[in-house]
Amino acid sequence: MLVYRIVQKKYSKTLFVSGMEGRWNSKGNKVLYCAESIAVAFLENMIRRQGVGFNDDFKIMIIEIPTKAGITFFNVEDLEPGWRNSDNYSKCQKAGDEWYIACKNLLLKVPSAVLPESYNYVINTEHPEYKKVKLIEVTNLVPDERIEEILKKSPQKSNLK
């Protein structure tokens, strides 16, 4: 299976993880966030970065996951109301931290907060199968200039959830 990640150019040569907290992990839990498609990865980054700095500063990482990797899966129906709100990560972090600590499956498949009909994959870098995860290609990210211009004009940048 292939998953996709959009990162700053300086982080695109390795599967770097910082341990910073995110929607599905508390600080210190080293996970790698990826998406099921380049489009979903781009949408996730658009919301986080609000359209600024995409063109030359970012790359697309194409990552190969072992075929038989175990997956823990959450549907939208499995999640607490309000899980998409960016100001309340705790609703998702509890479930993500339990998955991470149990270390049963390499992957956590979760709905995208931006587009819940699509999925993100969180990779547990402490799982024994992680050593089989491979960065197979890095490509340029060249989004349509109009996307960045629209987002720069948006008066509701900070209200996106």
Image (tube, grey):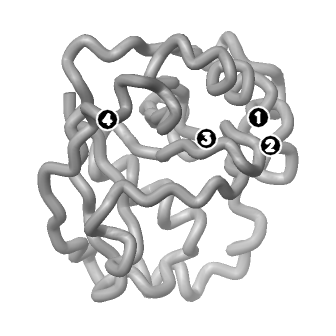
Towards the viewer: 68 or 37: 68
- Does 52 appear above or below 91? below
- Does 150 appear above or below 124? below
Q: Residues within 10 Å of mark 2 (few under 14, many from 20)?
A: some
- Residue 131 is marked as 4
Q: Earlier in the sequence, mark 3 or mark 4?
A: 3
Q: Earlier in the sequence, mark 4 or mark 2?
A: 2
Q: Earlier in the sequence, mark 3 or mark 1?
A: 1
Q: Residues within 10 Å of mark 4 (few under 14, many from 20)?
A: few
Q: Residue 38, position in %: x, y? A: 28, 51
Q: Is residue 150 left or right of residue 80?
A: left
Q: Which structural element holds mark 2?
A: loop
- Residue 93 is marked as 1
Q: Is residue 146 visible?
A: no
Please state which of the two labelled residues, at mark 3 or mark 1, is closer to the viewer.
1
Measure the alpha-carbon separation of dots 3 and 1: 13 Å
Measure the alpha-carbon separation of dots 1 and 2: 6 Å
Please state which of the two labelled residues, at mark 1 or mark 4, is closer to the viewer.
4
Asked whether the beta carbons under mark 4 and mark 2 sit within 8 Å of each other, the answer is no
Towards the viewer: 129 or 79: 129
Q: Residue 46, position in %: x, y? A: 49, 66
Asked whether the beta carbons under mark 1 and mark 2 sit within 8 Å of each other, the answer is yes
